[in-house]
Image (cartoon, rainbow, N blue to C red):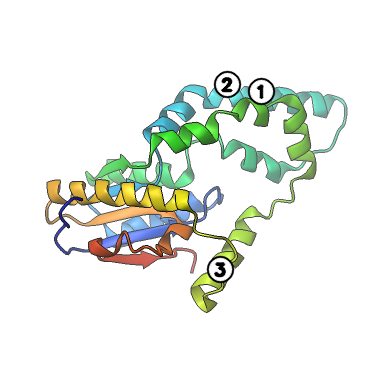
Amino acid sequence: MLPLADEKTFYMLGVIHRDKNNGQIVERWLNEIRPDVITIEFSQYGLIFRKEKGLMYRKQVESVLEKMRQNREAYNEEALSFLYAFIDLPGEYEAASRYCIGNSAVLYPVDIDFFSYMNLRKIDELFSEENIRNVVGTYDGQVGSNERAMARLFFDAGIEMTPYTEEMHIRDRYISRKINVLMRYYSGKQFAHITGWQHLKDPQAVFAPLHPVKVFPYD
């Protein structure tokens, strides 16, 4: 086990993954708390995958949509943002990148590559023509609002609608150790960690030694 980092200001921003407003929301909070170092629940594998293959999958979606337009088939515009969220760089990552460029800060994706690989290995099935048609034809566009409702129930009333899984625990334990190492390297610097809101639960208290200030930035 790594020795614990010294106490310092460490913000954890709990975001709703794939929320279309994440870029604006995260950028506003980063400008407020002014971190020197930002870590993000995003892996190098996921970053490289999206940079190298995102455009290819976008073209597959556009090809299917063009066929649907020619056949005068209706599709849900909101569903496109849901699909693109799997292949575009997350809004929170892009916001953090812009902040770092403008403020001489540094950004570290700190999640585990293995789980990103497992989540993305069947992406060809998700972006098959049949599945694209199914998603854009039936998606109800409520992911963001549903997630906000579940988060509010947890933070306001302690009602847990979705479990904190063993995978989350493994990843958080790994991430907290990486952040601890970075804190020692960047001694005395202000840190912010951008993560999914469910990781703010931290029932095993793996982040507790880092003394986090937890923020749900949609309030």
Crowding at dot 1, Cα within 10 Å, few <14 / some 14-19 / many 20+, comes out as some
Q: Nearer the viewer, mark 3 or mark 1?
A: 3
Q: In the image, what residue occupies the spot 39% across and 48% down?
A: 170
Residue underneath mark 1: 60
Q: Nearer the viewer, mark 2 or mark 3?
A: 3
- Which circle's residue, 2 or 3, is located before the other in the chain? 2
Residue underneath mark 2: 56
**Are the residues flagged by discs 3 and 1 in contact, CB closer than 8 Å?**
no
Q: Quadrant of residue 111?
A: top left
Residue underneath mark 3: 160
**Spatial distance from mark 3 to mark 1, Cα to Cα?**
38 Å
**Are the residues flagged by discs 1 and 2 in contact, CB closer than 8 Å?**
yes
What element does badge 2 sit on?
A: helix
What element does badge 3 sit on?
A: loop
Image height of 159 relative to 73, above or below = below
Answer with left or right where residue 130 lies relative to residue 8: right
Q: In the image, what residue occupies the spot 64% across and 60% down?
A: 146
Identity, as a three-letter code, of the amino acid under mark 2: Met
Answer with left or right where residue 216 lies relative to residue 189: right
**Are the residues flagged by discs 2 and 3 in contact, CB closer than 8 Å?**
no
Identity, as a three-letter code, of the amino acid under mark 3: Glu
**Spatial distance from mark 2 to mark 3, Cα to Cα?**
38 Å
Image height of 16 relative to 65, above or below = below
- Which circle's residue, 3 or 1, is located before the other in the chain? 1
What element does badge 1 sit on?
A: helix
- Residue 162, x across and y down, in percent: 57, 61
Identity, as a three-letter code, of the amino acid under mark 1: Gln
**Spatial distance from mark 1 to mark 2, Cα to Cα?**
7 Å
- Residue 171, x across and y down, in percent: 39, 47
Crowding at dot 3, Cα within 10 Å, few <14 / some 14-19 / many 20+, comes out as some
